[in-house]
Amino acid sequence: MEPNLKTKSKTDAPEQFREIVEKGATQSREAFEKMSAVSSQAADVMKNCCSTAVKGAQDYNNKLIEFTQANTKTAFDFVQRMSGVKSPSEFVELSTELAQQQLTTLTEQTKQLAALAQHVTLATAEPLKTDFTKASDWS
């Protein structure tokens, strides 16, 4: 009976080895599939964030152009009004009025640009934070 056990043991070894190899292959395939899914998600997140950032930059630039046009119009209006100045006191009054108007306008424009920049930053960064946190939990 003893030789029979050795024979059985020899035939079981390749079967056990095959099972170990199959189990390892299955685990490797599952890990690869998970990593592939996470990589795909990460690529989608990056693509969406880049699109959001580009749109935000366009919106910011459009707002700057709008402000530049408004400020240029104000400057031309001031020059036209200055051409009709008849006295030094009228010049001082007009200059003071323009300075106050510019301060108010620039303060408001700065607030709007800061709010727009903050909105774009949050709209770009939040999905990165959320989605990469999800993606890192794949294990």
Image (cartoon, rainbow, N blue to C red):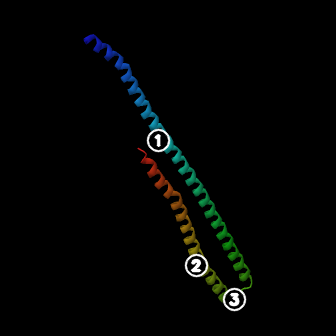
Q: Which residue corresponds to the image point at 36% horizontal and 17% vertical from the top-left?
A: 11
Residue mark closest to the camera, 2 vs 1: 1
State how far apart marks 2 and 1 are (Cα): 56 Å
Q: Residues within 10 Å of mark 3 (few under 14, many from 20)?
A: few
Q: Is residue 45 left or right of residue 25?
A: right
Q: Which residue is mark 2?
A: 104
Q: Is residue 8 left or right of residue 106?
A: left
Say which label, 1 or 3, has the lower sequence index: 1
**Mark 3 and mark 2 residues within 8 Å of each other at the beta carbon:** no
Residue mark closest to the camera, 1 vs 3: 1
Disc 1 residue type (three-letter): Lys
Say which label, 3 or 2, has the lower sequence index: 3
Residue 117 position in % (x across, y down): 55, 64
Q: Residues within 10 Å of mark 1 (few under 14, many from 20)?
A: some
Give the position of the C terminus as an image quadrant.
Answer: top left
Q: Which residue corresponds to the image point at 57% horizontal and 50% vertical from the top-left?
A: 47
Q: Which residue is mark 1?
A: 34
Give the position of the N terminus as an image quadrant.
Answer: top left
Q: Is residue 64 above or below residue 30?
A: below
Regarding mark 2 in the picture, which secondary structure is present there?
A: helix
Residue mark closest to the camera, 3 vs 2: 2
Q: Which residue corresponds to the image point at 62% horizontal and 63% vertical from the top-left?
A: 59
Q: From this viewpoint, which residue is outermost toward the left? A: 2
Disc 3 residue type (three-letter): Ser
Q: Is residue 97 above or below residue 6?
A: below
Residue 73 position in % (x across, y down): 70, 75
Task: Say the numbered circle drawn on residue 87.
Answer: 3
Regarding mark 3 in the picture, which secondary structure is present there?
A: loop
Question: 1 or 86, which is in the foreground?
Answer: 1
